[in-house]
């Protein structure tokens, strides 16, 4: 009996030793695998950074990252090493999202990411206080964050052909330098209040939306000289439109207009396209 007890105890002791060895071996293998994966990531990031550096050019004294018709669904964090960039021109690269670290590119003046598959604008965009042009046309964006209103230097904003944008946050009226706004080919049913209250706006395209009428408060846009409203469902124009003294181009083709307000005859600078 005692021999059996000793034998069982010895077996258990050996089993325990081997279990510890196997556990340690598995842990070592896991650490080795993680280390190898880390090395691969570092190598891939360095390769990506090298490729990105090859795409950097300098035009008119401006440092530009220019990529077109290549596959870049995401942008690596190694891009942060190129934080001196002043302009991004990334077209038709299949980009799925604007990187969360976009706000760290404090020198950006132009951000052109048109013709990709971007679905949202990160809130960090508001950190780009020097940004003058934001071009996001031909993407899949549905909403615009209020943080965009913090881009105090913004002069040009293009969100055309995203097809699903239907409103803008009221805070965008704080874009005091914005003169050019393209919202064509989306789902707007009216001109957003934020747009009506943009003090410097000169050029507005809201063609190919679902506008049925224009607000009486359209006269607030006193600096507007060009207004594109083609391919909507507009049936009439408010008389207040005659108070827009600087309006010289008004495009109304492919709507459902019955007549033009008589008061518009006084708008001598106006060139109408109906």
Image (cartoon, rainbow, N blue to C red):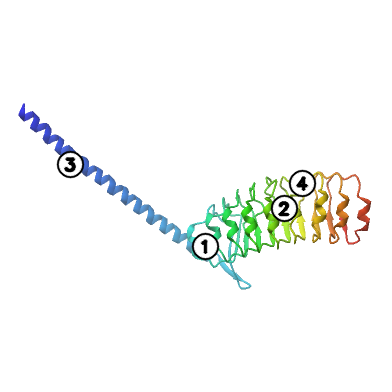
Separation of disc 4 and disc 3 at Cα? Answer: 76 Å
In this view, the residue in front, 70 or 245, is 245
The residue located at (74%, 50%) in the rendering is: 193
Q: Which residue is mark 2?
A: 194
Tell whether 59 sits left or right of 191.
Answer: left
Q: Is residue 51 above or below residue 236?
A: below
* Circle nearer the viewer, 1 or 4: 4
Inter-mark Cα distance, 1 to 4: 42 Å
Please name the residue shown 48% across and 62% down the image.
Answer: 49
Please name the residue that numbered disc 1 is placed on: 52
The label number, if any, that marks residue 190 in the structure image:
4
Q: Is residue 15 above or below residue 47?
A: above
- Along the line of sight, the residue nearer the viewer: 22 or 211: 211
Distance between the alpha carbons at the discs numbered 3 and 1: 52 Å
Looking at the rendered structure, the secondary structure element under dot 1 is helix
Q: Choose the circle earlier in sequence order: 1 or 2.
A: 1
The quadrant where residue 39 appears: bottom left
Q: Position of residue 208 (x, y in %)?
A: 76, 48
Q: Could you classify mark 4 by the number of other residues whose Cα lies within 10 Å: few (under 14), some (14-19), or many (20 or more)?
A: some
């Amino acid at each position: 009996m005692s021999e059996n007890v000793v034998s069982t105890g010895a077996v258990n002791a050996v089993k325990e030793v081997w279990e510890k060895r196997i556990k340690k071996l598995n842990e070592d293998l896991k650490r080795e695998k993680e280390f190898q994966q880390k090395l691969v990531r570092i190598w891939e990031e360095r390769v990506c950074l090298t490729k990105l550096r090859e795409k950097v050019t300098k035009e008119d004294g401006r440092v530009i990252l220019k990529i077109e018709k290549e596959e870049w669904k995401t942008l690596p964090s190694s891009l942060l090493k190129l934080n001196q960039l002043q302009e991004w021109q990334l077209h038709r690269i299949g980009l799925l999202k604007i990187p969360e670290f976009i706000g760290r590119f404090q020198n950006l003046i132009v951000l052109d990411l048109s013709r990709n598959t971007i679905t949202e604008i990160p809130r960090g965009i508001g950190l780009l206080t020097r940004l003058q042009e934001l071009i996001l046309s031909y993407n899949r964006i549905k909403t615009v964050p209020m943080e965009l209103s913090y881009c105090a230097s913004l002069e040009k904003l293009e969100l055309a052909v995203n097809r699903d944008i239907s409103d803008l946050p009221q805070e965008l009226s704080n874009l005091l330098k914005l003169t050019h706004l393209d919202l064509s080919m989306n789902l707007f049913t009216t001109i957003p209040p934020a747009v009506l209250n943009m003090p410097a706006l000169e050029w507005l395209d809201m063609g190919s939306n679902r506008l049925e009428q224009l607000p009486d408060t359209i006269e607030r846009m006193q600096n507007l000289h060009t207004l594109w409203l083609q391919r909507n469902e507009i049936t009439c124009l408010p008389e207040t439109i005659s108070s827009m003294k600087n309006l010289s181009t008004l495009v109304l083709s492919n709507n459902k207009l019955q007549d033009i307000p008589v008061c518009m005859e006084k708008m001598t600078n106006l060139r109408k396209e109906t």
